Amino acid sequence: MARHGMMKLGMSMRGLGYHPAAWRHPDVPADGTLRFEHYAYNAQTAERGLFDMIFFADGIGLRERDEPRGSLARSGYELVEMEPLTLLPALAVLTKHIGLVTTASTTYNEPYHVARKFATLDLISGGRAGWNIVTSWSEAEAKNFNREEHLEYDTRYERAAEFVEVVKGLWDCWEPDAFVYDKPGGLFYDERRMHLLNHRGKHFQVRGPLNVAGMPQGRPVLVQAGASEPGREIAAATADVVYAAADSLQAARAYYDDVKGRMAKYGRDRDELKIMPGVRTIVGRTREEAQAKFDRLQDLTDPLVGLARVYAALGDLSGYDLDGPVPEPQRATEMRSSTERVMQRARSQNLTIRQLYKQIVGGGFYLVGTACDIADGMQEWFEAEACDGFNVLPPYLPGCCDDFVEFITPELQRRGLFRTAYEGGTLRENLGLKPYVNRHAAARAQSAAAE
Ligand SMILES: Cc1cc2nc3c(=O)[nH]c(=O)nc-3n(C[C@H](O)[C@H](O)[C@H](O)COP(=O)(O)O)c2cc1C
């Protein structure tokens, strides 16, 4: 039976695209991540394609390593870019409907900062702000914030859970009707509608109130991207959207069922969370044309950049013949699961080093083909309840964003799988989420009803 409802779509427009050779593509502006017009153009294109949101992954440091030596200088991937919470308010002014979502770390921020900035983005954009909650994982980031190593896993997650509670509490400090602006009476706000947070926890002490209020969405949309046990639990308890990593339809279905199944114990309906795996799309008028576009991008991959992608698993292979077999790892004592996985792949397919790194560089969930092929793939996942939509990861920009909007959006619309106009005024409405009700206003309404 066909699934009712429509897909939700995000355009993940970080950098120059999600393929590490994107910057070398002839149609890609290599300096784009440092030029505002690049972001403005892609955001406006995604809005023309009626995307629910643009989405920025983010890191607060240069996380790629220079291994093998010299690879970083040839990579052009996640190197330098604009800071998204500064960028998004500017994009808000140039767009009207599309959601504006970015990542902010719970490890290297204070909750008050995050609550205040996203509340402000919600005001500037008229209700289109979303926060992708991450804990940050890299040593490179730790070194930018007074530490040698990143926080141990459990501490990071414990801090994240408390951080999110504090931010949500701060967003609720002012009830929606707190501000009476009574000029004749001389009263600016109603004291009964302002609530101190008075949070005292293990990681944070925050009194409040927040010095921003009146968010059009009640509060910004909460996005989560973590696959582990605690990550899934936070998603089920609090997230409005999950950005999921996708390997296969089967794995995506299992993840979908698992996370949605955890929601009931938090008193939430399955529909209150939208799960959106990442998908990389390359479209052509024919399959051959699409494949040629993909191959061209793959061929632009610098060997050192390719070798960097297998370094963690196999060590430095830069001294070997790239068109020869993948050597057995030297560090046998350190044989980890990733090493085993990569070697297994190389052996079973009899891959050369070059073929191996190309597979990894061009890996992830790719749909390459005509608009019909790509819509078929997306429809299959959606109807199998492996997702509620997708976070599109364009391999290079602006080309893959342009192509999606020109060819794939109309095909999805033709099939009744995607909107033909924005339904609502806010991101929350467009995602089909329930209006957010301030906790203090809800408690007051409840006690009034009980009297
Ligand atoms: C699809 C996906 C996207 C992510 N995006 C970011 C990101 O933009 N910035 C970041 O610091 N971490 C990002 N992460 C990392 C997670 O926030 C988290 O730190 C990491 O996945 C480890 O948590 P887990 O074990 O729960 O997956 C992402 C993870 C996934 C699965």
Image (spheres, grey):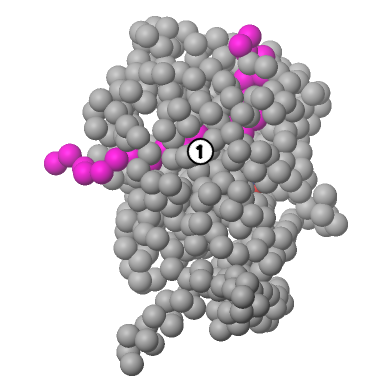
What secondary structure do most residues of the magenta stretch adopt? loop
Rendered view: 414 above or below 244: above
Among the 4 quarters of the image, the one containing residue 436? bottom left
Q: For the residue carrying disc 1, how many other residues have a C-alpha within 10 Å: few (<14), some (14-19), or many (20+)?
A: some
- Magenta region, residue range: 1-27
Q: Residue at x 63, y 72 (%)?
A: 183
Q: Which residue is mark 1?
A: 96
Residue lying furthest left: 1
Q: Position of residue 378 (x, y in %)?
A: 33, 32
Q: Nearer the viewer, residue 91 or 191?
A: 191
Inspect this view and state whether residue 260 appears: no
Residue at the bottom extreme, as displayed: 451
Query: Which one is nearer the viewer's eye here, 360 or 10?
Result: 10
Which quadrant is the N terminus positioned in? top left
Measuring from the top left, give residue 304's x and y in whole percent.
72, 20
Q: Nearer the viewer, residue 194 or 108?
A: 194
Q: Residue at x 82, y 54 (%)?
A: 145
Name the outermost residue toward the front. Answer: 184
Q: Is 62 in front, or is 169?
A: 169
Residue 179 at x, y percent in the picture: 58, 71
